[in-house]
Image: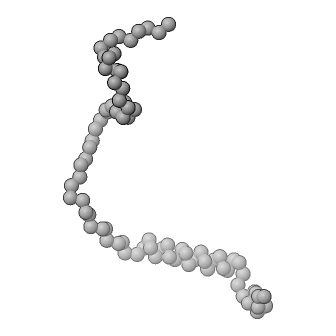
Amino acid sequence: MIDPSLAHSINRRQFLRGTCLGFGGMALNSMLGSPRPAPKAKAKSVIWLFMRGGVSHMESFDPKPALNDHAGKSIPDSP
């Protein structure tokens, strides 16, 4: 059972106010605190690929050997 003397010591509004202020204080502390130093870079070099255009992703990963037989030929008209 709840002790009757403690039942009315704090209401829901006071509890939520205190909880929100506590979490807000922790968030404010992390925002206003000193920034952490950046970790030391481990990479020795970078490969930077800057390409414009190119082959479709569907054509580059799905080889079609039958297309070599039709290379240079005209496409027949459809009925």
Which residue is rendered at x = 52% and y = 77% of the image?
25
> Between residues 68 and 47, which one lies in front from this camera angle?
68
Q: Quadrant of residue 77?
A: top left
Which residue is rendered at x = 65% and y = 76% of the image?
16
Which residue is rendered at x = 63% and y = 77% of the image?
17
Q: Is residue 69 left or right of residue 6?
A: left
Find residue 21 and report its horizontal and vertical position in percent: 57, 77
Res 67 visible = yes
Find residue 43 and report its horizontal and vertical position in percent: 24, 59
Q: How is the image coloured?
A: one colour
Location of the N terminus by quadrant is bottom right
> Between residues 29 and 68, which one lies in front from this camera angle?
68
Which residue is rendered at x = 55% and y = 75% of the image?
23
Res 56 visible = no
Q: Is residue 19 left or right of residue 46?
A: right
> Across the whole image, how many numbered discs are drawn on residues?
0
Give the vertical position of 59 relative to 32 (above or below): above
Q: Quadrant of residue 42?
A: bottom left
Give the vertical position of 8 relative to 41 (above or below): below
Find residue 71 and report its horizontal and vertical position in percent: 31, 17
Q: Is residue 3 left or right of residue 30?
A: right
Find residue 11 and report its horizontal and vertical position in percent: 72, 81
Give the vertical position of 66 relative to 11 (above or below): above
